[in-house]
Image (tube, rainbow, N blue to C red):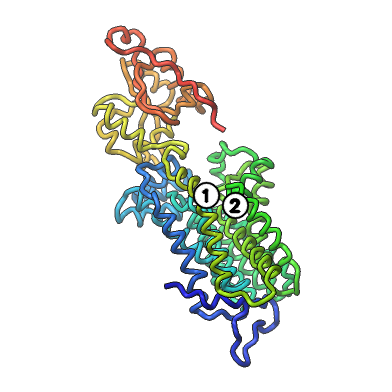
Amino acid sequence: MVDVGPLVETQPPRAAGRTAAVPGGAGAERTGRVPWRVRWGAPVCLPALVMLGLGLWGVDRGGIWRDEAVTFQVARRSVPQIWQLLHGVDAVHGLYYLLMHAVLALHPNEVVLRLPSVCAAAVTAALVGELGVRLAGPRVGLWAGLLYAVSPMAGHYAQEGRSYALVAAGATGATLLFVRGVRTGAWRAYGTVLAVTCWLHEFAVLLLLAHAASLALARVGARIWRGWGSAAGAVTLTLLPMILVSHAQSAQLAWVRPPTWATAESLLRWFLGPGEGVYWTCLVLAVLGLPGLAGPPGRLTCARVGLPLALVPPAALMLVSQLSPLYVDRYVLYALSGAPLLVAAGADRAARLRLRVPRPPVLALTGAALAASALCFQLPLMSDDRDPARRPDDLAAVARVAAREVRPGQPVLFLPTQARNAALAYPDAFAGVRDVALDEAAPESGTLYGREADAAELRRRLSGLDRVWVVADRDLLAGRWSPAGPAERAKMAVLAQEFLPAEESADGDASVRLYVRRVALSALPGLAPVPAPQRPARR
């Protein structure tokens, strides 16, 4: 049973002769020393358990989408093959791929693929709770941890086989060590954890800007600035090789568009809660938490840590993206940890304004009940999110159609090259088929999807076929975007000029179609051309 008794007091009793302030006074915390039974009780364990339960709910969706498929197929390569790949593409995810190589060696399936993210999200919820305990007391820690655990954004990436939930855990852990560093002057662990986190994804380095803003708001002394600056410099130096290599691979982000005010508003809603009632309630409470920015120098508060954490990394990436588009919301998932701290601090201040007597344990439980009500309001959204159809594509559905319709030895054309992701993620469904365009397989070529023949060779190979199965992006077939490169354009041109779609066997963003040469179509009884699908353009 969870012990909530100690949540009565925001300021735990001090032992005789013990002071709440640290020697030197900088970074003194309002809560003093919190007993370990309180710290590892409800404020830490309960959010972790809630997040773990929500993360495991529906984790076996029966399908993975394109980014997860990249993790799945790359992590199952040998270490030398992964190393070869990173020289040309995806260096920013190199450490994560190596980690997942070890994980998937145990049992390669989609649940195991997502389990590290589920566990990392649970750890992050616990760390948010611990941050609240250290900055404002057990009650605020409990509320902040629960608010993180019931966030639909946290739940979404808890179930994605990519690095973002692990980066969030590392960044939140680094923030906890940052608070400890301000109090004690010990910065080595902070620098180590943040450096490893940045190697999981380089945009975690923007956390340094958030921590610098926290120090400025707290008006700490020169000694703390020097200690933090040394750690920050070391983190930046260790990340330089990654920055240089990933800059050379920046063409991978050519699809990213500059963020707008609507982008910023959307992120704010995801941080506070996408439901109208939850969003406005949390926004009001966050505003009530802002007075924590004021106060004596040298003290870190929920506002002084939470606001920069939630605001600075996304704002910095959005500003840079006006010149060179880099911003994607998942790249700053770790900033989500700051929002629950600010909201919980505002809720605590609202309780203080309303109640001028010591708060009983029922107050802490009331806050937990309100977090539970936020979860109830957002359950339909979370339930929908667990439907594979909510992702950009469902490669398992494509694989099921291929296994049912395409026979060994039959020719298959992937359009564009990235559509081969389905075969790489689900090789059994495409066993024995003849990949018309492929020259060298993905693992051996050091590429994500394999090396294909040039345009002239593709035309020659297709000229000898009367029928070919095409696994393609439906928007590409419908003419809503143009293929890049001469080989992709050659595929499109040959299909348009010499073939007609005779049969379509998959819905969604990816399509499996049988194409038959025009002169041979009349010889196939029962087959008629299939018109191009009319679907609204993607938003």
Q: Is residue 116 left or right of residue 371?
A: left
- Residue 270 drawn above or below residue 298: above
Q: Kindly state the secondary structure of the residue where label 1 is placed.
A: helix
Identified at 37% across, 48% down, the residue is: 81
Q: Is residue 396 left or right of residue 139?
A: left
Pointer 2 with pointer 1, Cβ within 8 A? yes
**In the rendering, at what x and y percent does residue 230 appear?**
64, 69
Packing grade of label 1 (10 A; few <14, some 14-19, many >=20) is: many
The one nearer the camera, 470 or 329, is: 329
**In the rendering, at what x and y percent does residue 293 appear?**
73, 66
| CA separation in Å, label 2 and label 1 | 8 Å
The numbered mark at residue 278 is: 2
Task: Report whether residue 37 is seen.
Answer: yes
Of the residues under marks 2 and 1, which one precedes in the sequence?
Answer: 2
The numbered mark at residue 378 is: 1
Identified at 47% across, 44% down, the residue is: 385
Under mark 1, the amino acid is: Gln
Q: Is residue 514 left or right of residue 201?
A: left
Q: Which image quarter is the C terminus in?
A: top right
Most extreme residue toward the bottom is: 16
Under mark 2, the amino acid is: Val
